[in-house]
Image (cartoon, grey):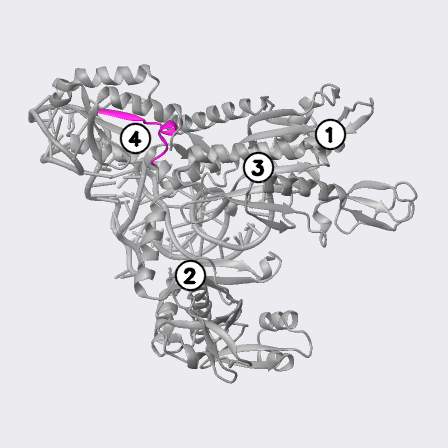
Amino acid sequence: MAEESSMEVLVKKGQTFGEVFRKVKAVVAAKAGNTLFDLSDTATQDIKASPVLADSREGITILRHSGAHLLAQAVLQIYPDALPNAGPPTDEGFYYDIFMEPISSEDLPAIEKRMHELAAKRIPIRKERLSREDLLKSFKHNKFKTERITEKVSPGDSSTVYVQDEFRDFCTGPHVPDTGFLKATKLLSVSSAYYRGDENQEKMVRIYGTAFPDQKSLDEFLRMRDEAAKRDHRKLGQEMDLYVFNSERAPGFPLYTPNGTIIRNEMIRYMRELNQSRGWQEVTTPHVFRDEIWKKSGHFAKYKPNMFVFELNGDGYGIKPMNCPGHITIFDRKVYSYRDLPVKYSEFGTVYRYEKSGEVGGLTRPRSFTVDDGHAFLRLDQIVDEILSVLEMVKEASGKLFEHPDLSFDLSIVDKENPDNFLISYKCRTCGVVSEIRKAAGSEFLCPSCSSSSLEPDFSKWDQATDALRKALAMAGLIYREIPGEAAFYGPKIDIHAKDALNRDWQISTIQVDFFMPPNFGLFYVNAEGKKEPVIMIHRAVYGSLERMMAIVIEGSAGRLPTWLSPHQVFVLPVNDSALDYANQINRELVSMNVRSEVDASKESISKKIRMLHDLRPSYILVVGSKEMEDKSVTVRGKDNKQEVMPFAGFREKIAREIRERLV
RNA sequence: GCCGCCGUAGCUCAGCAUGGUAGAGCGCGUGCUUGGUAAGCACGAGGUCGCGGGAUCGAAUCCCGUCGGCGGCUCCA
């Protein structure tokens, strides 16, 4: 993708940007400062502007936005009753949500064909500016558009419509000058979406597509997409024989084979070392608890529909969806001095959540998963250090798992405008008493002290926690996004994301500050004055879940796992029976060093064996015959599938170091 | 949960529109082959066509229901 053009030119008042830039090939818009203009726009004053090229980041976004319009135009020509809602560009293309009878992917080729026809006609794309009234009149047949206009254009104001032949769309643009720019377009899939993302509203047909400046880059994109599909952990897990999904016996619950269990156990072993070095003590808690704990923790109030619950002899039980209440129960066993803190418990805790049927999928969204969970019980003054320490663990771990770690950091904070989903303290305007109240939507509260109804939210605890997270992020030198409204119900958090093979973002690590659950359970410590002080909790997970992390590591490495994680580290292949003894000898030596090594003595050709072994993705294949026997060497075929002859002693050292240092 | 697509041998898939009771490749087993880096040869075993119901003389194929899987949406972290 080309860099932004820095070719700045003076556009004089009264000139259109197109007059200046049309001569530049593949220019789709103009940019002055941070403002984008259509080429048809007229400069209202002398202004320095640069062309936006079709193959620049901004240019492609414009191209795709126009692609969405082209899609809507084609759909309307074929389905005249369809009502378009909205069609934005995305990272990889565009989609358009359209209210219409459901269509299937078999209907896409006809729509795509029409798009290509419209593109070939090079229909000019014009912009009209209309008053709010005229906009509403213009789209009066489409309630989705009129709702958008009503919302986005204030009374007395005006906005723009883009027109290509009979098709008109309410849109602020900018757009490409004509449909001829949209020759390299492709429709990818069709699915459904709710209007405004609300499941109680109309279901829209969402058609996904993409557009590129030229056919070559579109083809390349489609090729990469196919390649990515081959790295899907569900496919690789099948080939590498890592796990089983039995949809009848355990829908959404992964079962691990011996190979998959090796990967899990190696991940656990490494995390145990990391936990130990950072002062996290391992604990073990049951999978089932009485209702009582879930009522106290707030899970029943908020999370019950997602829990597996059952009744026995009149008592209610819940299978744990989270590990925190168990750790709290252990912490709660005694009284702590301020000198005892922090207390840090960790557990590879398998949790069970009833995810709705349409959400379950592979290892990235299973119904049971194991969290490398940890709960720290702290004093206020210990928060920042602990967050920093966890951030360092995340950094260290990602260096052992990914060749090129690609993590993104989000700081999810409370939305002070819409605090209904969070635990908030309320301060009484009358008597000044601060009370902690779990807000239930729509209910009214009175001050527990003076019964006044004049209460204001008190965000001081949220602010303290959020500041601690910000401070730690800054100290770690990390770039992050702040997202209001995404906090956990009990506190703000840092979420760390990684991408799967298909470029989908998944949350892995999380660090959450919690001022609310400890008081719910009455957790306290005794300070230097002998007074009770509230304990503060940090919930954290470094891998997040073993399942999701394993999936991402498998996809990121295309199955060529770091040697330390690989179920099959070495296969020794004797060329013929006379080399079998040497192969066995090498194998024994490797096994004695705790290398996962096997001899393939089956009566197949070397070619055949290598072909067969490919699916298992072993770290190394060693081929040995008379030559190797003679000089105590091995012919090594590594992850790159290149072969290299080296002394066996050298290979032994190499792989030992790779495993010991967990090199990627 | 919602919309679309899909469910046939251990795996990948064909057959289904125009119903006549099942096919390929790989893998697996046996035999031959002693083979130097991505398929040596031959023979063989292997399937209640996800499950339940319906119309039909007859269903993998048509209809209804149901359970799963995939892509999204919503949810979740």
Corner quadrant of residue A235: top left
Label 4 vs label 1: CA separation?
48 Å
Amino acid type at circle 3 is Arg
On screen, residue A125 above or below B66:
below
The residue that appears at 37% across and 74% down in the rendered structure is: A24
Q: Residues within 10 Å of mark 4 (few under 14, many from 20)?
A: many
Query: Which element is circle 4 on?
Result: loop
Amino acid type at circle 4 is Pro
For label 2, the residue is A104
For label 4, the residue is A618
Quadrant housing the N terminus of chain A: bottom left
Chain letter for mark 1: A
Report the magenta residues as a range. Answer: A560-572
Report the front residue among B18 and B55: B18
The residue that appears at 60% across and 45% down in the rendered structure is: A411
Label 4 vs label 2: CA separation?
41 Å
Q: Which numbered marker is on residue A535?
A: 1
Q: Is disc 1 on the same chain as disc 4?
A: yes
Q: Position of residue A380 (x, y in %)?
A: 72, 33
Chain letter for mark 2: A
Q: Which numbered marker is on residue A353?
A: 3
